[in-house]
Image (tube, helix red, strand yellow):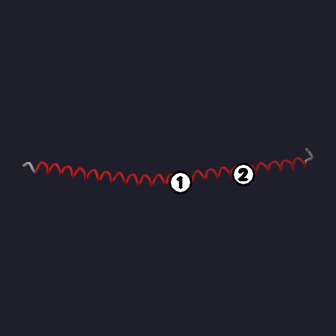
Amino acid sequence: MKTTKPKKAISDLARRVRELNHRIAAVRREQQYQRVRESEFRDTSESTNSRVVNWALAQLVILRLTCLWQVRHLKSFFIDKKLV
């Protein structure tokens, strides 16, 4: 009877070790998945950020060109009307 208790304790311990190994493997898989997702999210965020900056610069250029056109147009209008 003395040999059955240690064998049972060892088999219980081996079962617990296997369970813990499975849990560790699951955690590692989840960590790897999260790393991939974080990397993809970072790439998407950087791409979006650069697009926003480029769009803002394009808007500034368009605004500047529109202002220049309006000033020239109004200037020629006032010159034609001989108000200036």
Q: Which residue is mark 1?
A: 44
Q: Is residue 25 left or right of residue 1?
A: right
Q: Is residue 27 left or right of residue 62?
A: left
Query: Furthest-left residue in view?
Result: 1
State the residue at coordinates (63%, 50%): 53
Identify which amino acid the numbered label 1 is placed on. Thr
**How far apart are the alpha carbons under marks 2 and 1?**
26 Å
Q: Is residue 14 left or right of residue 35?
A: left
Residue 60: where, in percent of width, then height? 70, 49
Q: Quadrant of the C terminus?
A: top right
Residue 68: where, in percent of width, then height? 79, 50
Q: Which residue is mark 2?
A: 61
Residue at disc 1, secondary structure: helix
Query: Furthest-top residue in view?
Result: 83
Identify which amino acid the numbered label 2 is placed on. Val
Of label 2 and label 1, which has the lower sequence position?
Answer: 1
Residue 28: where, in percent of width, then height? 36, 53
